[in-house]
Structure formats: structure tokens, C-alpha cells
Image: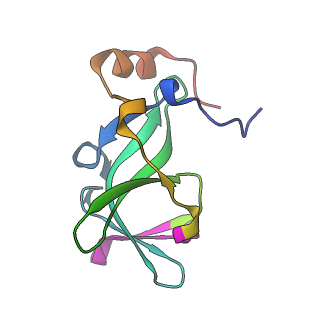
Amino acid sequence: MANEQPRPHDLRYLDADHVKHPSGTFAGLTVCSSDDENLGSISGVLVEPASRRVRYFVIERRDAFLARRYMLAADTPAVLEAENRTLRILSNVDDLERFDARQVACFSDDDAITAMFAHPAA
């Protein structure tokens, strides 16, 4: 069951401002496919506190008048290009799934405690 998909009620949304990497945060990080297609920018992540894993990137895409958010599996191979704030990912626009924020709670203090005291991630 290593590839079992988490259920929406097991996931928590964490804003990109709170997700750090060695050269800053994920806030506004551009996501591009390996063939340079702009997929959008990271607005947050969906984490599973009990397993201490980021399961999805939440990506905001803008049309002429509208911004929509999508999910992209975080286990997709990716390279962070810190100098130009780009996450180059082995994926394309067809891999994006609509994100419904109403189905996922925000990361809370209780979730932080769950993550700290859960069994080690496998």
C-alpha cells in the first residue's frame, strides 16, 4: 500500500509562505515542465501530518481574468532552480487536478503535534 492515495480529510493545507527550502520559501515559486511550459506558481502544499509528507503542490494558474488553483502530486520528480525561483518538474498541464479548498482543512497546531509524535515516516 505504499502508493495508496491519502483521503482529503487526512490532508492539511499549508501556505507556501510557511514552506522553506535552502534559499527561501515556496511562495511565488514558478513551476515549469521539463520542456519549459509554465504551469503556474506555488501557493501552498497539501501535507499528511501523520506520515510527515508533502503529498501535493497547490499551484495557482492565471487566465486573463481568473486565478484557479490546482493540485500536482509532490512525488513527481523535480529540480529546484533556486537562482531563478523555478521548480522544474517532470510533468505537464494535463497532470494538474482542480483543487477544492473546501475539502481540506488548514494545517493547525494539533497537526504539528501529530507530525512531531507520529511514528517515523517510512
Q: How is the image coloured?
A: rainbow
Nearest the viewer among 42 and 113 is: 42
Is 33 on the left or on the right of 29, as rendered?
right
Residue 48 placement, left or right of 94 = left
Is residue 104 in sight in this rendering? no
Q: Is residue 118 above or below residue 11?
A: above
Image location (x, y in percent) of residue 113: 37, 16
Between 11 and 117, the one nearer to me in the picture:
11
Q: Give the range drawn in magenta.
A: 79-93
Q: Is residue 95 magenta?
A: no
Residue at 33% in and 28% down: 107
The answer to which image quadrant residue 87 occupies is bottom left
Is 106 positioned to the left or the right of 9 in the image? left
Q: Which quarter of the image is occupied by the C terminus?
A: top right
Residue at the right extreme, as displayed: 1
Q: Where is residue 99 in the image (x, y as percent from the top left)?
A: 43, 47
Q: Is residue 32 visible?
A: yes
Indicate whether 45 appears above or below 118.
below
- The quadrant of the rendering that contains the N terminus is top right
Q: Residue furthest bottom?
A: 35
| Residue under the image location 36 percent in, 38 percent down | 101
Give the image location of residue 38, x and y in percent: 40, 77
Residue under the point 25% across and 63% down? 66
Which percent across, then down, holds residue 74?
53, 52
122 left or right, relative to 28: right
Front residue of 9/108: it is: 9
Q: What's the residue at 30%, 55% (across, down)?
A: 26
88 falls in the magenta region: yes
Indicate whether 21 appears above or below 45.
below
Count of numbered badges drawn on the protein: 0
In the rendered image, which quarter is residue 94 located in?
A: bottom right
